Image (spheres, coloured by chain):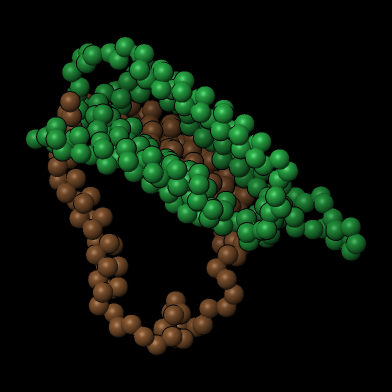
Amino acid sequence: MFALSGYDAFLGFLLISAAVPILALVANKLLSPKSRAGERQLTYESGMEPIGGAWIQFNIRYYMFALVFVIFDVETVFLYPWAVAFHRLGLLAFIEALIFITILVVALAYAWRKGALEWS
Amino acid sequence: MTIASTTQLICFAALSITLVVGAFGVVLLPNIVYSAFLLAGVFLSVSGLYLLLNASFVAAAQILVYVGAVNVLILFAIMLVNKREDLSAIPGLALRRVLSAAVCGGLFLLLVRVAFTTPWALPGPASIGEEATARIGEHLFSDYLLPFELASVLLLMAMIGAIVLARRDVYTSDVITGEPADQGLIEKARTPLLTSKP
């Protein structure tokens, strides 16, 4: 039995947001004039012409950002129930959560110190 | 106000179909980028199933961690790998396929048998809906406090380990010129960004 409340609006929102890209692509397909090879087939008609393929190797530093992001993403999952039950838990839980965040700030400081967050 | 049972059934069917078709696409599509994006779709469907089972916190965690983080990591790993290569055919491909099909089919049959023989428990205590997340928070900050704080230490260790591994220096060198060679993913990390500043 479904017991969560307020998900009817969520379902409607989900359907509408799924329809937006589909409608955009279909309308584009139906309405746009068809003809003229060449420039029209480029990704950006009025910009620079793309050179080479799209399959290029990206720099490892992007992976570092992703790794740091994963750590703080998991932290968010732990803080989420604390935020929901914040009013019930009181001061002690606040201090506990502060300890949790402090330990992770150490991780952030380490990443910062080692230059994992820099963009050069 | 809750979703009526018909809507619920339709949602379940749609989610299941999306999940199964997406999972087949992940395995069967030749382009690895399509597989990665379909995997995100599979994770989203799974979170939808959690939502249908009144587990809103698990659904949120599924989207946050799996779609938001794990799948992004997979996509980044694909982007970091060089262009697609022409792989040579593996010897004995047919035999390997038959063997893996036998293993997978056996596992599938086992799962089907488990699904049909398990006496699925009838609804026990009534579901508490949105209250569940607050209840998880209460438990997390009272009787599960130590695991909660240890989790932050674990995350700290994971962060340090990731950085240490990623900024490992290169010891391999080019055979002909003798210069250090950029060979793998990790070794590329010795660009100025990731070396420690003196």
- Of residues A113 and A52, the one drawn nearer to the viewer in this rendering: A52
At 30% from the left and 34% from the top, the residue drawn is B49
Quarter containing the N terminus of chain A = top left
Looking at the image, residue A49 sits to the left or right of residue B13; the answer is: right
Q: Answer yes or no: is residue B131 visible.
A: yes
Q: Answer yes or no: is residue B73 visible.
A: no
- Of residues A33 and B37, the one drawn nearer to the viewer in this rendering: A33
At 20% from the left and 39% from the top, the residue drawn is B10
A112 in relation to B54, above or below: below
Q: Measured from the top left, where is residue B194 in percent x and y?
A: 65, 54
- Of residues A5 and A50, the one drawn nearer to the viewer in this rendering: A50
The colour with which the image depicts chain B is: green
At 35% from the left and 37% from the top, the residue drawn is B46
Q: Measured from the top left, where is residue B85 in percent x and y?
A: 66, 58
Q: Which chain is brown?
A: A
Quarter where residue A78 is shown: top left
Quarter containing the C terminus of chain A = bottom right
B122 in relation to B157, above or below: above
Looking at the image, residue B152 sits to the left or right of residue B11; the answer is: right
B141 in relation to B20, above or below: above
At 41% from the left and 18% from the top, the residue drawn is B113
- Of residues A38 and B113, the one drawn nearer to the viewer in this rendering: B113
